[in-house]
């Protein structure tokens, strides 16, 4: 296995400067790019006709309906196989929260609701100002006075117990709890159970060839500067103009580049907000050129991120192709939703721009993004805090954020740091989780081997 | 709960929650060894039927939480009348005989020989100074309290007493009610602790009891010990059981529920013990099945009759001492009784602590100078106190709205879900899940009054008020200020052998000259303004000059006693004469002294106390003492009151006026450049008991030092205990007109305390919220940020936003209650209600509802009342709002007043300047010409109409601008989508359930209209964005 160290491309960085940034790369004939099937973009997260007469209750309702049987199965499996001698009274299952009888040991499944002090509250903001501006970003919602509830369509019960302090919980997840209701009507929880990993189709085995997907996010292109050098280096690496034979061989095996959100720098958008007229030159044009170069050599899939010119509520709809007039012409380019599912020759990828993980982490300050991503797999939901604190479209019939099938690769864009982990499930599921760091601060791209799920962060740091 | 409860016990209670209802049983005790000590909460009178004697009944609770009914015997009603000259003790029996003979002849008298006894004593009338000469009085004791007026009439009409001749006299103290007389004579204060000493009382066996209390005892009034509540040990409060409840009834569409037709469908109850944090009973009685609620006991009934009967049973078992709720007095209770009567549930009205006495609802009117006049029902529920939190709020607070919703938003800082009464019936007619939803809502409404009471310390403050003023607890809500002063007077006169005459009201309602104001020098002061306050001005004037009923002099008395002016008596500025305290110390001054020194003590204790509960009690006490001291002056001035004495009240105010003038002179003469001070001080304003002084200095420290110096200096010029205090500095200070000002309030130089305003209408109900917000923001900018320019710019921006229709509708809604239909003049909300009824009788506001409306644009000459419209209707149909109306009629006047002192003539520019040129009027989708209009898409860039059938975003010529336009539209979508998400998730949170649709229609909530608008806005933004889909 050809390991790519961070230093390797750095050494060749200087040479690449000789090539003009606009020079179209010519793929090397000796290293023909590995081919993949190119199915149409997955429509799982796209919304065709948006309406807003329905309410958010539907999202929770549908979510609970789908995840409750799953969580219940896991809870049954975990708790009812206990040796009965452990407790004096038999543990019983309450089909609904309201079926719990005080004083009796029960387990029950429902949606978690965290009442948190520092959660953005539009009423508070309103009393201070006249309008509903976006809330000031908070690093955490948690405080010492928070309360946790479990609810289903029938009712809500307050959860208490030491275990809740140790368990990361986020509003909107569906879990099982066991315990006893006390006289105050509080449920004293002794154990918590998550749905666990969803089933997974096996990794395609016929493939003996190494294929890589390159994950990048947070490009941070701005009008002020030309495309950052590191980004140019990455492009040259992918098209095979960089490094030695080893690098070029590796480059040829990169079958797809996925931009997991945030092409544009954050300061760029803020400035545009106040301007009466927006400029369509500048940042977007640079991104267009960069993508065109890439897409002429490899398939490029782009997801919008928090700073991109797309709608901000989850799921973000594909960036409009009019924003990339040049790249849009190429068949190798696809504009995706955020989050998005990908299928590369049978390998299932699920990617997000990072908003959901960031928001969920604010509920439990001690949970890092990688752990949160893993938890989401076990909760079978990639955006539990939507709609409560993560704005989302009011879905009425379905909750697209439910993970019905564990992906082989789950990547989170726009993270502060690179992190990765292989998660294994009880039924043999295997999932590679990757936190893709922002490129503009880390100059790092993550290559994932689609055959082995091995992961290689590659630095394109450029010190002149 | 003292011990932790095991799971088994929890399970047992969960299986049978009724086990929690009754009080702990009383353990047997020996009456000869154990005293019966309890906190009495209610006192009433009764007749011992077998003996025909009056009885005082005390209802209360022991420290162990047992309910007590104590019958106090041997106390008889009495009153006084001047005895005939030279009457001898042995002749008294003739008088008794003569009065009884004559009284027995009266038709209305039910008691044979009503006079029990007459004693000869020497007393002096309270009214006027007559050289401290006591004269003989008859103390006439009667058999029952209802004999008092008959006997009085006999005596006043004249009795022929055989050889002694005719006896006729005017009677004294006949107005004092029997139980109040008892309280005065036995030293019983409102809600204080009393004791039946061991061996001196008997306990009734169950079959002898008339009440529903756990302990029923008999004691003589001679043995009863009353513990003064100002002793630390007796300042405690018993573990009272407090029940809070709320009912729901299923009304018909468009009609306010009527007890004869519409059923009571739910009653939610929450019971807690005073001093504990959480309720120990939470239950809801439902008509029809109800899915269970965690932590709550649901009792379902198929027949409404059973529900009501069971509720009475519940009340009797729980045996609450205090029953609270929100508008229970005028809605919940009367509705329940009417409904039960209609359904013929005979057992229902037996809710009181008297086993055989049903509760009666009577109409009453509460009238008080301090609190205004209100019609109110009276629920006679003997032995259980009622505290309707709505009445508490209306009495103690000035608010825009008194709906439970807005009161909770104000004091508990949370919005409350509000289910419209038309939906309630739908929920009831649904299934057990929808009824459960209703039950949860009902339960919340039962819990909120309890939380409100705890938060505002209402019960504790009222108990302290009852203790301090010595009136029964239930008088606090049902009576005004006068009774408090009367009770204190009686408690005093009884010790000093004074008797209180009956005084008919003095003349008409003619007002006497009020407090003075020094003409304000209006303006914006950007230098510290020191404020000197007379502490407790009116009480201290009365004390300083010994003004009282007992010291009032008549010209004839001065002559006959040969008194000398300024040696023996003083002449007040109103030319009234009062003797000096060396001859006779006034009663009112000594009451006031006691009150004020008690307050000083309470405040000192408060400083030392660390226990939060005792702190609350002490704070309540000092507040009660302050209010009581201040009400004494008003008592003497109440012309239609019990004991008006305008000589006292007008003397007090005239002294006050003189003192303010004198203070101004003293300050302006002393603090001058000539006397070595930096600047000449100037009094810029003075009102009632305070004077605002501009010393000219620029720093807060200097102003505070000078303020203290001035206060000390001026105080020396007045008689003790009049005291001028330096309290605060206003910096900056905005003086508008008299009684209207605002300033930043400083008591220490390092940090300001608050923004203080007076007379600036921010809470007036007929203003829209915009006025309040704009005024408050301007004040903050002017006073806190000291940014006058910023306030101007802000005002301009808001006016500009208003005219361009950018202000949120909830800011513009005006709300008025539809109290009666036949208003004399046309009123906007009445007209609107009528119009809405024509549109849809089902959803139109009912009598008693509050009608929210906005003023819309209409025909040129249409009056404002014709242009009122339902905000929801306006939102749905894009009806243009008359923004001019809001500027001219709502904002203009208050803003002019606020900015006049700052900007002078330029204030007009603020209201009519450049920023008012741009006006946006939205296009209505209904009415008028819109019926005939044909909709055509226009190019988003150049607004040119697109070809028929085309829906693209732009026309062919504007293709190159697509990307920019797209991003702009995206921005709109993102803004509106965020609004939509934030507002609707908030409602989802607030209603306490994620899985159910929001049905709240609380129009008091600031986001109610916003969320409706957000829904429409996001849809139209998204639709426009979608037009870009087809462009490429």
Image: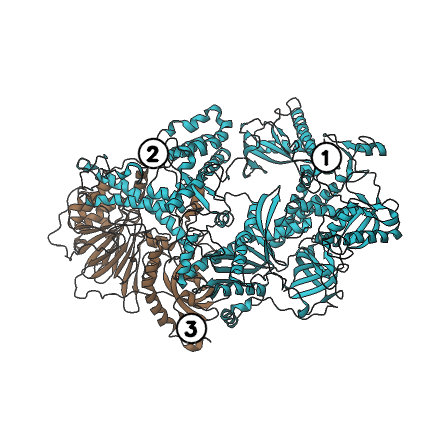
Chain colours: A brown, B cyan
Residue B233 placed where, x, y %?
69, 57
Q: Residue at x 12, y 51 (%)?
A: A28
Q: Give the residue pinned by disc 3.
A: A91
**Image quarter of residue A350:** bottom left
What is the CA distance from the residue labelled 3 to the residue labelled 2?
66 Å
Residue B686 placed where, x, y %?
62, 30
> Residue B920 bears which disc, if any?
2
Q: Element at badge 2?
A: loop
| In front of the other: A401 or A185 | A185
Q: Nearer the viewer, mark 3 or mark 2?
A: 2
Judged left or right of residue A241, residue B98 is right
What is the CA distance from the residue labelled 1 to the residue labelled 2?
63 Å
Label 1 close to label 2 by CB (< 8 Å): no
Q: Is residue A223 above or below residue A96?
A: above
What is the CA distance from the residue labelled 1 to the residue labelled 3?
82 Å
In the displayed image of the protein, which residue is found farthest to the top? Answer: B674
Q: Give the residue pinned by disc 1.
A: B647
Judged left or right of residue B566, residue B764 is left
Residue B992 placed where, x, y %?
43, 56
């Amino acid at each position: 296995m050809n390991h790519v160290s961070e230093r390797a491309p750095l050494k060749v960085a200087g040479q690449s400067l000789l090539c003009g940034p606009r020079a179209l790369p010519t793929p090397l004939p000796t290293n023909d790019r590995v081919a993949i099937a190119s199915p149409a973009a997955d429509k799982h997260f796209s919304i065709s006709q948006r309406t807003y007469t329905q309410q958010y209750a539907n999202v929770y309702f549908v979510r609970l309906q789908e995840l409750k049987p799953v969580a219940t199965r896991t809870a049954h499996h975990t708790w009812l196989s206990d040796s009965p001698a452990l407790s004096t009274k038999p543990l019983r299952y309450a089909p609904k929260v309201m079926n719990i009888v005080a004083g009796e040991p029960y387990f029950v499944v429902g949606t978690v609701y965290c009442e948190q002090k520092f959660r953005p509250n539009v009423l508070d903001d309103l009393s201070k100002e006249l309008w509903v501006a976006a809330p000031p970003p908070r690093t955490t919602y948690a405080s010492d006075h928070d309360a946790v509830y479990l609810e289903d369509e029938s009712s809500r019960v307050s959860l208490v117990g030491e275990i809740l302090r140790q368990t990361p919980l986020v509003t909107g997840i569906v879990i099982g709890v066991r315990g006893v209701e006390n006289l105050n009507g509080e449920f004293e929880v002794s154990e918590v159970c998550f749905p666990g990993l969803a089933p997974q189709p096996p990794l395609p085995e016929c493939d003996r060839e190494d294929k890589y997907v390159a994950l990048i996010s947070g490009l941070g292109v701005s009008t002020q500067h030309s495309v950052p050098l590191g980004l140019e280096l990455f492009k040259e690496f992918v098209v095979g103009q960089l490094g030695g034979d080893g690098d070029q061989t590796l480059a040829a095996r990169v079958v797809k580049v996925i931009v997991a959100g945030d092409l544009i720098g954050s300061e760029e958008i803020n400035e545009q907000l106040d301007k009466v007229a927006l400029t369509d030159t500048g940042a977007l044009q640079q991104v267009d050129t960069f993508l065109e170069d890439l897409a002429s050599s490899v398939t490029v899939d782009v997801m919008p991120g928090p700073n991109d010119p797309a709608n901000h509520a989850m799921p973000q709809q594909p960036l409009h192709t009019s924003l990339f007039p040049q790249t849009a012409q190429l068949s190798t380019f696809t504009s995706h939703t955020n989050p998005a599912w990908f299928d590369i020759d049978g390998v299932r990828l699920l990617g997000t721009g990072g908003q959901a993980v960031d928001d969920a982490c604010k509920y439990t300050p001690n949970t890092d993004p990688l752990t949160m991503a893993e938890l989401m797999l076990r909760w079978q939901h990639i955006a539990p805090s939507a709609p409560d604190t993560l704005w989302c479209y009011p879905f009425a019939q379905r909750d697209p954020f439910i993970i019905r099938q564990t992906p082989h690769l789950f990547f989170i864009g726009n993270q502060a740091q690179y992190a990765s982990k292989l998660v294994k499930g009880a039924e043999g599921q295997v999932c590679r989780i990757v936190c893709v760091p922002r490129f503009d601060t880390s100059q790092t791209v993550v290559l994932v081997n689609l055959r082995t799920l091995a992961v290689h962060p590659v630095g394109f740091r450029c010190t002149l | 709960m003292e011990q932790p409860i095991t799971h088994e016990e929890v399970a047992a209670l969960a299986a049978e929650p009724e086990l929690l209802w009754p009080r702990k049983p009383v353990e047997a005790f020996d009456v000869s060894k154990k005293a019966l000590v309890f906190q009495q909460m209610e006192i009433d009178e009764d007749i011992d039927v077998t003996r025909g004697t009056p009885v005082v009944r005390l209802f209360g609770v022991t420290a162990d939480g047992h309910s007590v009914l104590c019958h106090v015997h041997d106390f008889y009603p009495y009153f006084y009348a001047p005895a005939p000259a030279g009457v001898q003790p042995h002749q008294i029996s003739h008088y008794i005989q003569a009065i009884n003979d004559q009284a027995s002849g009266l038709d209305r008298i039910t008691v044979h020989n009503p006079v029990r006894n007459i004693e000869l004593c020497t007393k002096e009338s309270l009214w006027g100074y007559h050289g401290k000469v006591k004269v003989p009085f008859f103390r006439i004791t009667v058999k029952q309290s209802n004999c008092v007026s008959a006997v009085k009439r006999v005596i006043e009409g004249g009795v022929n007493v055989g050889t002694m001749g005719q006896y006729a006299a005017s009677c004294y103290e006949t107005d004092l009610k029997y139980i109040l007389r008892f309280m005065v004579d036995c030293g019983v204060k409102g809600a204080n602790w009393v004791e039946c000493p061991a061996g001196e009382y008997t306990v009734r066996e169950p079959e002898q009891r008339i009440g529903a209390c756990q302990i029923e005892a008999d004691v003589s009034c001679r043995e009863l010990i009353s513990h003064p509540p100002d002793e630390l040990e007796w300042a405690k409060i018993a573990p009272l059981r407090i029940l809070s409840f709320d009912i729901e009834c299923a009304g018909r569409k468009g009609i306010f529920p009527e007890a004869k037709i519409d059923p009571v469908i739910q009653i939610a109850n929450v019971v807690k013990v005073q001093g504990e944090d959480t309720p120990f009973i939470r239950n809801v009685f439902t008509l029809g099945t109800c899915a269970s609620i965690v932590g709550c006991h649901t009792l379902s009934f198929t027949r409404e009759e059973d529900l009501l009967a069971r509720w009475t049973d519940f009340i009797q078992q729980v045996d609450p001492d205090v029953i609270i709720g929100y508008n229970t007095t005028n809605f919940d209770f009367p509705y329940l009784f009417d409904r039960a009567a209609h359904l013929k549930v005979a057992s229902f009205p037996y809710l009181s602590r008297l086993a055989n006495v049903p509760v009666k609802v009577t109409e009453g009117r509460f009238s008080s100078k301090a609190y205004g006049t209100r019609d109110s029902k009276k629920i006679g529920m003997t032995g259980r106190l009622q505290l309707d939190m709505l009445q508490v709020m209306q009495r103690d607070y000035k608010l825009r709205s008194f709906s439970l919703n807005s009161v909770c938003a104000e004091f508990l800082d949370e919005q409350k879900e509000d289910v419209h009464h038309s939906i309630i019936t739908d929920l009831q007619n649904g299934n057990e899940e929808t009824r459960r939803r209703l039950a949860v809502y009902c339960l919340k409404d039962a819990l909120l009054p309890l939380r409100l009471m705890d938060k505002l310390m209402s019960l504790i403050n009222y108990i302290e008020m009852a203790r301090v003023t010595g009136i029964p607890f239930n008088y606090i809500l049902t009576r005004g200020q006068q009774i408090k002063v009367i009770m204190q007077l009686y408690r005093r006169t009884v010790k000093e052998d004074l008797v209180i005459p009956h005084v008919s009201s003095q003349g008409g309602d003619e007002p006497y000259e009020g407090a003075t104001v020094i003409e304000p020098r209006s303006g914006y002061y950007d230098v510290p303004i020191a404020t000197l306050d007379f502490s407790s001005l009116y009480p201290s004037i009365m004390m300083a000059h010994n003004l009282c009923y007992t010291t009032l002099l008549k010209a004839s008395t001065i002559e006959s006693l040969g008194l000398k002016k300024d040696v023996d008596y003083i002449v007040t500025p109103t030319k009234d004469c009062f003797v000096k305290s060396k001859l006779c110390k006034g009663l009112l001054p000594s009451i006031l002294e006691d009150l004020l020194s008690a307050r000083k003590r309470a405040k000192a204790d408060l400083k030392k106390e660390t226990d939060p509960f005792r702190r609350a009690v002490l704070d309540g006490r000092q507040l009660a003492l302050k209010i009581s001291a201040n009400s004494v002056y008003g008592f003497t001035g109440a012309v239609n009151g019990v004991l008006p004495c305008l000589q006292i009240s007008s003397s007090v105010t005239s002294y006050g006026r003189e003192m303010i003038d004198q203070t101004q002179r003293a300050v302006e003469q002393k603090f001058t450049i000539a006397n070595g001070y930096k600047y000449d001080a100037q009094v810029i304003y003075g009102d009632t008991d305070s004077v605002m002084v501009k010393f000219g200095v620029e720093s807060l420290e200097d102003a505070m030092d000078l303020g203290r110096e001035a206060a000390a200096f001026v105080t020396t010029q007045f008689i003790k205990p009049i005291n001028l205090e330096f309290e605060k500095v206003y910096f900056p200070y905005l003086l508008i007109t008299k009684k209207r000002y605002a300033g930043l309030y400083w008591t220490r130089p390092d940090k300001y305390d608050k923004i203080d305003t007076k007379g600036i209408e921010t809470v007036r109900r007929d203003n829209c919220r915009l006025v309040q917000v704009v005024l408050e923001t301007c004040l903050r900018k002017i006073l806190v940020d000291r940014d006058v320019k910023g306030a101007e710019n802000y005002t301009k921006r808001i006016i500009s936003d208003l005219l361009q229709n950018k202000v949120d509708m909830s800011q513009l809604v005006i709300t008025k209650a539809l109290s009666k239909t036949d208003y004399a003049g046309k009123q906007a909300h009445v007209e609107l209600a009528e119009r809405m009824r024509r549109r849809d009788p089902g959803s139109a506001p009912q009598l008693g509802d509050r009608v929210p409306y906005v003023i819309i644009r209409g025909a040129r000459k249409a009056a404002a009342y014709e242009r009122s419209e339902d905000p929801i209707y306006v939102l749905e149909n894009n009806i243009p709002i008359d923004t001019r109306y809001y500027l001219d009629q709502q904002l203009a006047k208050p803003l002019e007043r606020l900015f006049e002192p700052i900007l002078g003539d330029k204030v007009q520019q603020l209201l009519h300047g450049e920023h008012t040129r741009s006006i946006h009027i939205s296009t209505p989708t209904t009415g008028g010409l819109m019926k005939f209009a044909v909709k055509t898409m226009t190019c988003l860039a150049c607004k040119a109409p697109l070809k028929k059938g085309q829906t693209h975003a732009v026309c062919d010529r504007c293709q190159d601008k697509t990307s920019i336009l797209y991003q702009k539209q995206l921005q709109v979508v993102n803004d509106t989508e965020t609004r939509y998400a934030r507002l609707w998730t908030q409602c989802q949170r607030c209603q306490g359930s994620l899985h159910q649709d929001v049905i709240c229609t609380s129009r008091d909530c600031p986001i109610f209209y916003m969320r409706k608008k957000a829904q429409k806005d996001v849809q139209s933004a998204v639709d426009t964005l979608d037009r870009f889909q087809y462009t490429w």
